[in-house]
Amino acid sequence: MSVMPPRAVLVSRASDLEELLVRHGTLGQAKFFLKSRGQSMDRLVDQHEAQSKCYQQVRAALPEHWRQAEVKRDELSRFLFSDRDVVVAIGQDGLIANLAKYAHGHPVMGINPEPERIAGLLVNYRAEETADLLRQVESRSCRIEQRTMVEARLDDGQRLLALNEIFVGQASHQSSRYEIRYGEAVENQSSSGVIITSGTGTTGWARSIIQATGSSISLDPADPRLAFFCREPWPSPTTGTGLQHGYIDEGRVLALVSAMNEGGVIFADGIETDRLAFNWGMTVTLGVARETLNLVVRS
């Protein structure tokens, strides 16, 4: 029986120029909109052209015997991955975070369309490296780094995954109110919300929290643990500040019980539309997901 060849799944997102054209209809209208605000379209055009050129270079580098598929970021939730898929993400680091929850078990490689402008930590390859990387993936001579992901699970069975971090709190500027349970410790809190981060996420949002608070929490990108941060907990007669941060090892969970009548949310990787409601009385447990991102990295 012959073995099906691998399939390269090329994942990309619309460029900023393409999204601008969707809003304004024509190139002329988009130019007028920017010019009326003292802005130029030159940077958007350069970015779009660089992304398009990179995409074509990657397509041209695909081995002739490989199958291929193309999917936009907004279509990932409807795309059916299959055996022997190799995911090739062309864009910025955020694109890898967007697709991680859908590409479980498949090797993912990130191609940076503008290495001179984008400091890619996950998209750390150039287009001209594509052919060699795919040969390594097919021969299984590449190195795969398993990146830990975060899982949020509500008591009604709903579930959310994130590569970088999960936020739990109020959707608006109001205080987030909840009971936090960490091991044997239990505390009522009012804060700006709780961030649960992976090692990958500590290069982003969590990094700014660590720097601002002087926290001693430290995770490497490939760390199997998670960490949590309660943002600006407020002391009062009914709320405390004793639980501000900590590690979540595999097999352990952080639990939060909502004390918010409305507006409580849980969202992943900064995408506020990818959310679960978290209103009064609901319990969410947060821990290490069974899924990982299998990132192709340099040997």
Image (tube, rainbow, N blue to C red):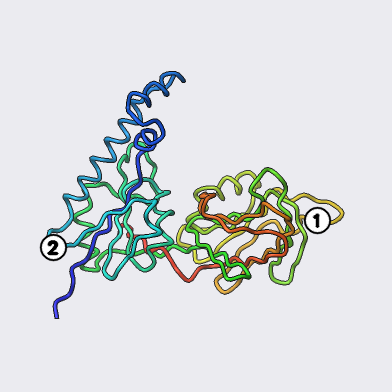
> x, y (%) of residue 253?
62, 69
Quarter of the figure that contains the C terminus: bottom left
99 sits to left or right of 205: left
**Which image quadrant for residue 154?**
bottom right
Name which of mark 2 and mark 1 comes first in the sequence: 2
Quarter of the figure that contains the N terminus: bottom left
Residue at 25% in and 45% down: 55
> x, y (%) of residue 114?
31, 39
C-alpha gap between disc 2 and disc 1:
62 Å
* Residue under numbered circle 1: 239
Q: Residue furthest bottom?
A: 1
**Which image quadrant for residue 104?**
bottom left
In the foreground, 271 or 286: 271
288 sits to left or right of 141: right
In the foreground, 268 or 247: 268
Q: Amino acid at mark 1?
A: Thr
Residue at 69% in and 67% down: 182
Q: Residue furthest right?
A: 237
> x, y (%) of residue 92?
38, 46
Q: Amino acid at mark 2?
A: His
Residue at 52% in and 59% down: 198
Callouts 2 and 1 close, C-beta under 8 Å: no
How packed is label 1: few (under 14 Cα within 10 Å), some, or many (20 or more)?
Answer: some
263 sits to left or right of 226: right
How packed is label 2: few (under 14 Cα within 10 Å), some, or many (20 or more)?
Answer: few
